[in-house]
Image (cartoon, rainbow, N blue to C red):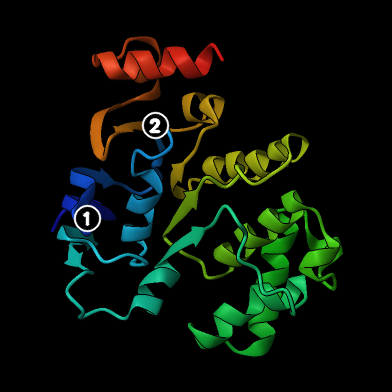
């Protein structure tokens, strides 16, 4: 068995006759912070949704510790507890408090007892700086605070991997930093993360591996220093020149 946590093998995804992802291959190891960059429409978010089993892939395999999770022999909810996801639109339950949002998944999916779920939720809410807001509802806090709660909720499931789908794109500019600071802290704690992002400074300075996608394919991947200073691919060079000079 390989030492990879996740292996994406020959993954393709089509909606009707439109191929969104074509023959995607890469691996994720423990402690990796892999960022996926590329223009809008390149297939980045669809790839993350396939990995989280929110989309059914057309062909290929997704291996979690060597087991193909696409074959129907694994419980999707149990898998998502181990491979958590943070969405750009937060996806919090509006009728629940911040604390309850961070407890419900533990209780319903992982069958954690109520008091343990509460203590775990409080621990991770404190970790992301949201402990003072445990009794607030989502409509009473800012976008940046909602995203930090969403991260705490995912962490409370104690996943092995966290997927982030453009976690700052729905935020006002002044709120982006507070979410990126939490993600930087997680990286320092050796949290394994797969991040779709337009935040190039985060990709360059925090990630251990960068994947550049265009038109549904991986054009280039490698260490941030290589991708950002000396990319091999002409499309990578043009994309970075465009986004870094804008």
Seen at 18% across and 54% down, the residue is 17
* Dot label at residue 188: none
Spatial CA distance of label 2 from label 1 is 19 Å
Seen at 49% across and 50% down, the residue is 164
Nearest to N terminus: mark 2 or mark 1: 1
Tell which of 96 and 104 is nearer to you: 96
The local secondary structure at tag 1 comes to strand
Q: Is residue 168 left or right of residue 146?
A: left
Task: For residue 3, say whether it is visible.
Answer: no
Q: Is residue 84 left or right of residue 67?
A: right
Q: Quadrant of residue 83?
A: bottom left
56 vs 115: above or below:
above
Q: Quadrant of the N terminus?
A: bottom left
User: Disc 2 vs disc 1: which is toward the camera?
Assistant: 1
Tell which of 100 and 120 is nearer to you: 100
Name the spot of residue 79 as percent of width and height, x first.
Answer: 36, 72
* Dot label at residue 38: 2
Seen at 24% across and 45% down, the residue is 27
Seen at 61% across and 43% down, the residue is 168
- Tally of marks: 2
- The reply to whether discs 2 and 1 touch (Cβ–Cβ < 8 Å) is no
Q: Which residue is mark 1?
A: 14
148 vs 238: above or below:
below
172 vs 76: above or below:
above
Kindly give the residue lying farthest to the front in the view shown. Answer: 17
Within-10-Å neighbours for mark 2: few <14, some 14–19, many 20+: many
Within-10-Å neighbours for mark 1: few <14, some 14–19, many 20+: some
Name the spot of residue 189 as percent of width and height, x first.
Answer: 54, 46
Name the spot of residue 131 as percent of width and height, x first.
Answer: 80, 62
Name the spot of residue 243 as percent of width and height, x first.
Answer: 49, 19
Q: Is residue 167 left or right of residue 226?
A: right
């Amino acid at each position: 068995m390989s030492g990879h946590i996740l292996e994406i093998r020959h993954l393709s995804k089509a909606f009707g006759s439109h191929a969104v992802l074509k023959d995607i291959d890469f691996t994720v190891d423990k402690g990796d912070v892999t960022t996926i960059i590329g223009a809008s429409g390149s297939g980045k978010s669809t790839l993350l949704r396939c990995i989280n089993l929110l989309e059914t892939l057309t062909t290929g395999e997704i291996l979690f510790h060597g087991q193909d999770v696409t074959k129907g022999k694994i419980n999707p909810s149990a898998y998502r507890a181990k491979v958590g996801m943070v969405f750009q639109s937060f996806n919090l339950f509006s009728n629940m408090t911040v604390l309850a949002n961070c407890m419900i998944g533990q209780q319903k999916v992982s069958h954690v007892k109520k008091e343990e779920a509460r203590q775990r939720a409080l621990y991770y809410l404190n970790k992301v700086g949201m402990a003072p807001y445990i009794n607030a509802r989502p409509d009473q806090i800012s976008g940046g605070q909602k995203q930090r709660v969403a991260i705490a909720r995912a962490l409370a499931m104690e996943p092995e991997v966290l997927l982030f789908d453009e976690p700052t794109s729905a935020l006002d500019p002044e709120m982006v930093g507070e979410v990126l600071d939490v993600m930087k802290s997680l990286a320092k704690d050796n949290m394994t993360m797969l991040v779709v992002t337009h935040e190039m400074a985060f990709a360059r300075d925090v990630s251990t591996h960068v994947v550049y996608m265009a038109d549904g394919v991986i054009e280039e991947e490698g260490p941030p220093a290589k991708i950002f200073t000396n990319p091999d691919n002409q499309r990578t060079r043009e994309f970075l020149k465009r986004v870094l000079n804008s």
